Amino acid sequence: MSEKNREGKRAARDRLAEERERQKSRDKQRRVLIVSAAVVGVLALAAVAGLVAANSGDDKETSGPLSAPKGASGEDQLAIPVGKESAKSTLTIWEDFRCPACKQFEDTYRKTIHELTDKGQLKVEYHLATIIDGNMGGSGSLRAANAAACAQDAGKFTPYHDVLFTNQPPETDDAFSKNSKLIELAGGVDGLVTDTFKKCVDDGKHDSWADKSNKAFQEAGLQGTPSVLLDGKNIFGDQKNPLTPAKLKAKVEEANKG
């Protein structure tokens, strides 16, 4: 065999070996891609499952029978009334005990509202929402709403309502999720802390009622908490003509003339 033929065969073998190596490399890359795709697929499924679980948690309804607090009024007994029934004007307030804007509203208007209700010029219907639990996570809005309903059972809603807002934790601090904290704060209301009240709080007696109240808030199409309506007309949140305690008093006096 000539030298030229031998060199030609060696070159062919070398090319064949190189092609085999390239093929091995391609096969390896293909296996890596297949494995990576499988991993991504598993992670995607896990993410979807997590999203579904998260959404399911947001929509989860509180279990247990619906138990409205004593004296609750209005449609489905979702309002807690304060003041004399004979009052001509009605102030409807939607609040969340974890809502900072609600605390600001209460700090600003509490004295005026108490004055008007004590004089028989105004009755108030409180509606409780739990939107901060949904926005920030946790259960403090629900637990506080239940505890406030328990205070209503004892005829002490107003002072306990005021204590909760006065002692409201920062929005990101879910301190109200602890029943022990809610019972501790109830100590600031004379005669509220009884075995009956503590059992009501710990058992979540009014959880389903609070859950239904929150759904009513969502279905009402309100912009947020607090929402404040005087005889059905929204009087709070107008930045061009902001409400003041004096304006609230004037609006009630004017409404009572009609």
Image (spheres, rainbow, N blue to C red):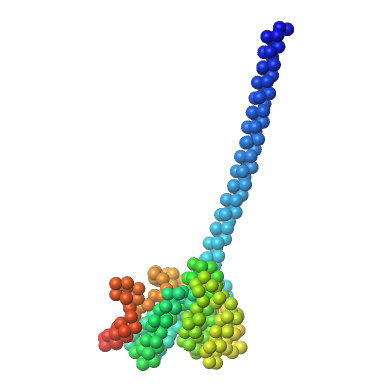
The correct choice, above or below, for 65 with respect to 123 in the image is above
Apparent side of residue 135 relative to residue 253 in the rendered image (left or right): right
Total label count? 0
At a point 55% along the width and 73% down the height, the residue shown is 174
At a point 61% along the width and 49% down the height, the residue shown is 42
Q: Quadrant of residue 20?
A: top right
How far from the left and from the top, in percent, is residue 63? 57, 73
Pick whichever, 123 or 180, lies toward us: 180
Q: Quadrant of residue 13?
A: top right
Q: Quadrant of the N terminus?
A: top right
The answer to whether residue 213 shows anywhere in this view is no
How far from the left and from the top, in percent, is residue 217? 43, 72
How far from the left and from the top, in percent, is residue 211? 51, 73
How far from the left and from the top, in percent, is residue 2? 71, 7
Residue extending farthest to the right is: 1
The correct choice, above or below, for 7 with respect to 146 in the image is above
The answer to whether residue 40 shows anywhere in this view is yes
The correct choice, above or below, for 171 with respect to 159 in the image is above
At a point 42% along the width and 81% down the height, the residue shown is 106
Pick whichever, 257 or 35, lies toward us: 35
At a point 51% along the width and 76% down the height, the residue shown is 169
Q: Quadrant of the C terminus?
A: bottom left
Q: Quadrant of residue 138?
A: bottom right
Apparent side of residue 73 relative to residue 235 in the rendered image (left or right): right
Apparent side of residue 190 relative to residue 16 in the rendered image (left or right): left
